[in-house]
Image (cartoon, rainbow, N blue to C red):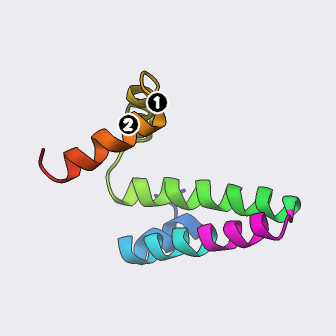
């Protein structure tokens, strides 16, 4: 759909607006999912979660990041506890 005409595809029209708009939309959907979760609105949480996944895929596409790269990163994290991974990630981001 990213290659379709903007008039025929929301995805194409969103991508035409650029990475900042795509990121903004992802943030909006995340906020809506948070609200649904804390208000125990399961139906909307399901819908907003689908929106998050869609907007994340669009953001990855416009940022030239393949979903396989994300999945590979997740796979590397399965061999250690979440606390270990988080500690390692903090060190990596600070150049250590």
Instruction: Say whether residue 55 is visible.
Output: yes
Whether tag 1 and tag 2 are in contact, CB under 8 A, the answer is yes
- Left/right placement of residue 8 relative to residue 69 reads right
State whether the magenta stretch is mostly helix, strand or loop: helix
In the image: residue 31, left or right of residue 77 = right
Residue interval drawn in magenta? 30-41
Residue 74 coordinates in the image, percent (x, y): 44, 34
Packing grade of label 1 (10 A; few <14, some 14-19, many >=20) is few
Where 7 falls versus 78 (above or below)?
below
Residue 43 shown left or right of residue 62 in the figure: right
Residue 41 drawn at (x, y percent): 86, 65
Q: Residue at x 62, y 73 (%)?
A: 31
Image height check: is 89 above or below 8? above
Q: Residue at x 30, y 44 (%)?
A: 89
User: Which residue position holds label 1?
Assistant: 81
Give the residue drawn at x 66%, y 61%.
51
User: Can you identify the residue that label 2 sits on?
Assistant: 85
Crowd rating for badge 2 (residues with CA inside 10 Å; few <14, some 14–19, many 20+): some
Image quadrant in which you'd find residue 11: bottom right
Kindly state the secondary structure of the residue where label 2 is placed.
Answer: helix
């Amino acid at each position: 759909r990213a290659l379709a005409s903007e008039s025929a595809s929301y995805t194409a029209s969103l991508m035409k607006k650029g990475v900042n708009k795509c990121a903004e939309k992802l943030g909006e959907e995340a906020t809506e999912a948070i609200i649904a979760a804390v208000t125990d609105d399961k139906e909307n949480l399901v819908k907003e979660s689908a929106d998050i996944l869609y907007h994340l895929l669009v953001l990855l596409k416009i940022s030239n990041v393949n979903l396989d790269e994300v999945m590979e990163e997740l796979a590397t994290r399965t061999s250690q506890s979440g606390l270990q991974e988080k500690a390692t990630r903090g060190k990596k981001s600070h150049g250590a």
